[in-house]
Image (cartoon, rainbow, N blue to C red):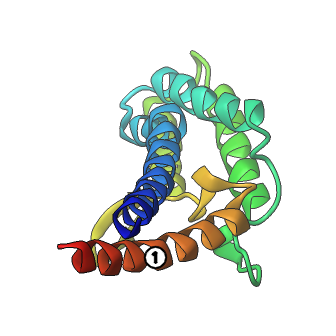
């Protein structure tokens, strides 16, 4: 019986970690990957298209307002600010036309890159609220992560007793 419960606990832990990984990968494929491409673009048109894909994903998944935090709100977890910044950046890109000078186009692209990329100790990364992939269920995922750690411990104990 202990072995059965241990395996169930391991499966629960695997399900929680797999779900979190899947949600993170989906966000990267549908949003942050396009933000990276927009930041790296050499043409305003390409940057605008990539930014539009990210904005469409955010709107389609209702990721336009709120905070990703669970206990208290901090500015770096403000989804509304993040979303509005992307929208404003796209509007700036759409103002560029054939009469815009090459220097102005370069400046718009540089400003976009500065908006989308954060430089830190570990290198550059896309500016995005932590936990966005799990929003609006961040509280649930915290509880599941804690339960997952507890069940992992239980499964290790029960399975080691069976050996």
Single out the residue that lies furthest toward the left: 163
Q: Quadrant of residue 136?
A: bottom right
Tell me the crowding category of disc 1: few under 14, some 14 to 19, or many 20 or more residues within 10 angstroms, Cα based.
some
Q: Is residue 72 above or below residue 96?
A: below
Q: Is residue 106 visible to us here?
A: no
For the N terminus, the quadrant is bottom left
Q: Is residue 85 above or below residue 26?
A: below
Left or right: 145 in relation to 123:
right
Q: Residue 130: x, y in percent? A: 56, 65
Using the image as rendered, state which of residue 87 and residue 77 is in the foreground.
77
Using the image as rendered, state which of residue 161 and residue 67 is in the foreground.
161
- Residue at 45 percent across and 33 percent down: it is 29
Q: Residue 124: x, y in percent? A: 33, 62
Query: What secondary structure is marked by label 1?
Result: helix
Q: Quadrant of residue 80?
A: bottom right
- Residue at 46 percent across and 36 percent down: it is 38
The number of numbered badges drawn on the structure is 1
For the C terminus, the quadrant is bottom left
Using the image as rendered, state which of residue 162 and residue 53 is in the foreground.
162
Left or right: 67 in relation to 36:
right
- Residue at 49 percent across and 57 percent down: it is 12
Single out the residue that lies furthest toward the top: 98
Q: Is residue 135 above or below residue 62?
A: below
Mark 1 highlights which residue? 149
Q: Quadrant of residue 74?
A: bottom right
Using the image as rendered, state which of residue 142 and residue 114 is in the foreground.
142
- Residue at 73 percent across and 36 percent down: it is 61
Q: Residue 113: x, y in percent? A: 45, 50
Q: Is residue 59 above or below residue 6?
A: above
Q: Residue 60: x, y in percent? A: 75, 30
Q: Is residue 49 visible to us here?
A: yes
């Amino acid at each position: 019986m202990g072995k059965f419960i241990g395996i169930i606990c391991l499966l629960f832990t695997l399900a929680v970690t797999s779900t979190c990984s899947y949600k993170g990968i989906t966000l990267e494929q549908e949003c942050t990957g396009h933000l990276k491409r927009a930041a790296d673009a050499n043409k305003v048109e390409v940057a605008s298209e990539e930014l539009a894909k990210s904005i469409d994903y955010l709107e389609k998944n209702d990721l336009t307002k709120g905070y990703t935090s669970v206990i208290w709100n901090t500015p770096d977890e403000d989804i509304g600010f993040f979303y509005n910044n992307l929208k404003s950046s796209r509007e700036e890109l759409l103002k560029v036309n054939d009469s815009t000078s090459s220097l102005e186009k370069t400046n718009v692209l540089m400003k976009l890159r500065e908006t989308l990329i954060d430089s830190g100790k570990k290198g550059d990364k896309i500016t995005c609220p932590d936990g966005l992939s799990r929003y609006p269920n961040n509280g649930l995922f915290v509880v599941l992560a804690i339960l997952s750690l507890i069940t992992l411990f239980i499964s290790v104990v029960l399975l080691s007793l069976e050996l």
